[in-house]
């Protein structure tokens, strides 16, 4: 009986292979996941806690975001813990969404965080399920998936937790992906000589995390999507104080409505410079070259009273002042130190002045400068090493002080957080690809930041070639897309026709697996249908009927900065 049925199974196994194959429910067990743990020697000095596995089955779930089209998916969440050899009490958790075996496409995906978080929960991981990948997040060892890096950064006032700093900087993602890839192979019986494609997707801090891997671990990922990366960390974080400091120095604190009005008037004035009046400033570079902020002086503004979580603001009714315009202008030019040298860059004209937003002081009925916590906390916690979320005020802070803070932070965290290594030769040699996208109207991380890094890499790797040859050489493995009108990691309510490219993960997969290198990106916008690849810029012709990607030297030049306030290269 026994051998008969066994023969029957064998003879039918070919026919019924699909039926016999393990289902998601079959593999979504603690036992199965434990058997698949990546306990092989992967060159990581870690020990997996084989008793730590937990699983959870999710079925028929509707997922979707601005990063991937919506879909109904099933997945199993598998979570386990490991520790670093030689460290006491160190526990790192990693969690992977695992697709159903019949949907698995021999792919692995790591996803990143935002702000000071090293993961975004399930904001990006379902995009992995959609493309048949196992998709992972890490908690960095900071305590839990919801604990951010800043909570773990100080062991005591004055004492840096360097292990946590290097984990946040790059090591946690190195481990997440190395473990994740082997775990994926074990889960789905993918042998060592069979190709498992590996990808990365993240934006903002998650974009920085992606770059931290591409710069150091050339073949970690076959393809990466790094949105609006928070690279040049010390400069970026300190620069969040730039608006407040300019106001402090000028002694003028514009009501938010005044700056919003200037932004709106900038959009209106610059909209048509791209050849189409559609509410989208697709050429903020021409806007930078041609727009005169002073023309907005005297224009009336009005914002009604409002109440939100962060307090209430009164009705704001006035006219744009010369002082307000001076702030807007100085902000757009980026910080300049007392010796007239460029310190850093700011968002493109037509972006919101988020980093210059004042706060209402009800007691004094006045508008006060506010140190943004990303900037203020960078100074108090990461430079002054005090367990404190923000500066008390910006009183007495000058542009020169900001420059010196940038300098200090760069020195202190050059090899952990700064993330501006320019030599991508190994990455190129490994055949890996990186697709970078950045909203042109990003008010949190200036689009110019991604241009500056691109140009630094071009100089470092292909500086002996002509500009055109250099960008062509980069096109092989590194493509940058400035998304017209888009905000930080997404679309922009102030320029709604712009949209955001939703299928970039699939685009990088096609680049890697089918060698279809993207010329342009599609967006979800009603007006913009494609996004040009840097250094090309969009231009409409035929009264807005057709759009082209053109090379325009003076526009390209307007994105170039030399940060000569520093006596070392700032890449
Ligand atoms: C999945 O969800 C759809 C729509 O919400 C529902 O119609 C369907 O019955 C569900 N299927 C299962 C297997 O739960
Ligand atoms: C480990 O952590 C526990 C609880 O957090 C603490 O009581 C103990 O002192 C720690 N041990 C070491 C060696 O750090
Ligand atoms: C992998 O192989 C093992 C042993 O042959 C089998 O039990 C398991 O179901 C396979 N896993 C999948 C996802 O097919
Ligand atoms: C700016 O434009 C937006 C529409 O994009 C509008 O909602 C807002 O009220 C305007 N702000 C001011 C100050 O006029
Ligand atoms: C704003 O102030 C001006 C001048 O004081 C006044 O004419 C106008 O009605 C006010 N607008 C609103 C909406 O309150
Ligand atoms: C650490 O610094 C913070 C901020 O200055 C302070 O509030 C706190 O009391 C300090 N903690 C200790 C233990 O000294
Ligand atoms: C430019 O430099 C690169 C890398 O150093 C080298 O591979 C290449 O051959 C050089 N090209 C020319 C035209 O000299
Ligand atoms: C953009 O959309 C067009 C039309 O749907 C499609 O053919 C093309 O492949 C898309 N391009 C990318 C990069 O996704
Ligand atoms: C261009 O298009 C706009 C709006 O679509 C229209 O109002 C205008 O008349 C057109 N101009 C020409 C010269 O066709
Ligand atoms: Ca336009």
Image (cartoon, rainbow, N blue to C red):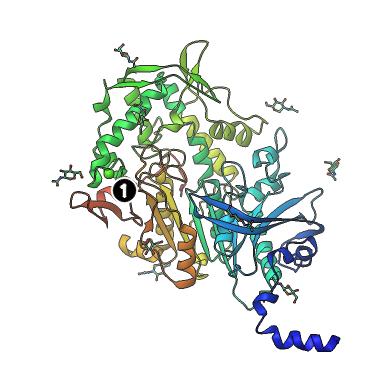
Tell me the quarter of the image containing the N terminus: bottom right
For residue 13, above or below residue 402: below
- Given residues 86 and 372, the one toward you in this image is 372
Q: Which residue shows up at 76% across the image and 87% down it?
A: 8
Residue 351 in percent (x, y) is at: 38, 37
- SS for dot 1: loop
Q: Which residue shows up at 31% across the image and 20% down it?
A: 321
Picture quadrant where residue 181 is located: bottom right
Residue 92 in percent (x, y) is at: 73, 51
> Visible in this render: residue 213?
no
Labels in figure, total: 1
Residue farthest along the top direction in this orientation: 364
Q: Which residue is disc 1 drawn over? A: 527
Residue 93 in percent (x, y) is at: 72, 52
For residue 135, above or below residue 36: above
Dot 1 beta carbon under 8 Å from ligand 10: yes
> Visible in this render: residue 71?
yes
Q: Which residue shows up at 56% across the image and 26% down it?
A: 309
Q: Is residue 12 left or right of residue 243?
A: right
Mark 1 neighbour density, 10 Å: few (under 14) some (14–19) many (20 or more): some
Image quadrant, ligand 7: bottom left
For residue 483, above or below residue 133: above
- Given residues 263 and 391, the one toward you in this image is 263
Q: Which residue shows up at 45% across the image and 45% down it?
A: 490
Picture quadrant where residue 144 is located: top right
Residue 119 in percent (x, y) is at: 62, 48
Q: Is residue 438 left or right of residue 325?
A: right
């Amino acid at each position: 009986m026994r051998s008969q049925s066994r023969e029957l199974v064998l003879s039918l196994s070919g026919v019924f292979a699909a039926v016999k194959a393990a289902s998601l429910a079959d593999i979504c067990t603690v036992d199965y996941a434990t058997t698949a743990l990546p306990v092989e020697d992967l060159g990581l000095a870690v020990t997996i806690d084989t008793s730590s596995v937990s699983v959870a089955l999710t079925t028929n779930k509707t997922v979707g975001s601005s990063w991937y089209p919506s879909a109904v998916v099933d997945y199993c969440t598998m979570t386990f813990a490991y520790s670093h050899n030689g460290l006491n009490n160190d526990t790192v958790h990693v969690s992977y969404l695992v697709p159903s075996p019949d949907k698995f496409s021999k792919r692995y995906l790591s996803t990143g965080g935002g702000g000071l978080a090293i993961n975004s929960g399930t904001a990006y991981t379902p995009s992995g399920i959609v493309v048949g990948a196992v998709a992972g997040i890490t908690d960095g060892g900071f305590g839990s998936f919801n604990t951010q890096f800043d909570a773990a950064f100080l062991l005591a006032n004055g004492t840096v937790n360097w292990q946590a700093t290097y984990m946040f900087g790059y090591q946690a993602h190195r481990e997440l992906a190395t473990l994740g890839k082997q775990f994926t192979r074990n889960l789905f019986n993918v042998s060592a000589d069979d190709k498992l494609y590996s990808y990365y997707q993240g934006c903002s801090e998650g974009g920085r995390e992606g770059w931290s891997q591409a710069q150091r671990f050339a073949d970690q990922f076959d393809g990466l999507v790094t949105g609006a990366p928070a690279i040049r960390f010390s400069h970026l974080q300190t620069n969040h104080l730039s608006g407040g400091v300019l106001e402090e120095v000028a002694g003028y604190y514009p009501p938010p409505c005044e700056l919003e009005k200037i932004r709106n008037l900038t959009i209106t004035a610059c909209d048509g410079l791209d050849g189409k009046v559609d509410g989208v400033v697709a050429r903020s570079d021409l806007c930078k070259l041609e727009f005169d902020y002073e023309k907005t002086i005297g224009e009336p503004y009005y914002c009604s009273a409002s109440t939100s979580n962060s307090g209430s603001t009164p009705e704001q009714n006035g006219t744009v002042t010369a002082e307000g315009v001076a702030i807007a202008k100085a902000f757009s030019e980026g910080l300049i130190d007392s010796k007239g040298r460029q310190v850093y860059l700011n968002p493109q004209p037509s972006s919101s002045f988020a980093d210059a937003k004042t706060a209402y002081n009800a007691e004094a009925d006045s508008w006060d400068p506010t140190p943004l916590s990303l900037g203020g906390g960078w100074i108090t916690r990461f430079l002054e090493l005090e367990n404190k979320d923000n500066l008390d005020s910006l009183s007495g802070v000058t542009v020169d002080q900001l420059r010196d803070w940038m300098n200090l932070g760069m020195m202190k965290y050059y090899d952990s957080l700064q993330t501006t290594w320019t030599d991508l030769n190994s990455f190129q040699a490994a055949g890996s690809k990186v697709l970078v996208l950045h909203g042109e109207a990003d008010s949190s991380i200036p689009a110019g930041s991604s241009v500056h890094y691109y140009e630094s890499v071009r100089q470092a790797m292909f500086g002996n070639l002509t500009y055109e040859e250099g960008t062509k050489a980069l096109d092989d493995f590194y493509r940058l897309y400035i998304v017209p009108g888009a905000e930080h990691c997404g679309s922009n309510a102030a320029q709604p026709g712009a949209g955001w490219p939703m299928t970039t993960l699939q685009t990088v997969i096609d680049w890697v697996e089918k060698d279809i290198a993207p010329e342009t990106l599609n967006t979800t916008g009603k007006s913009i249908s494609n996004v040009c690849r840097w250094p090309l810029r969009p231009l409409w012709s035929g009264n807005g009927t057709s759009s082209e990607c053109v090379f325009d030297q003076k526009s390209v030049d307007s994105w170039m900065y030399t940060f000569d306030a520093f006596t070392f290269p700032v890449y």
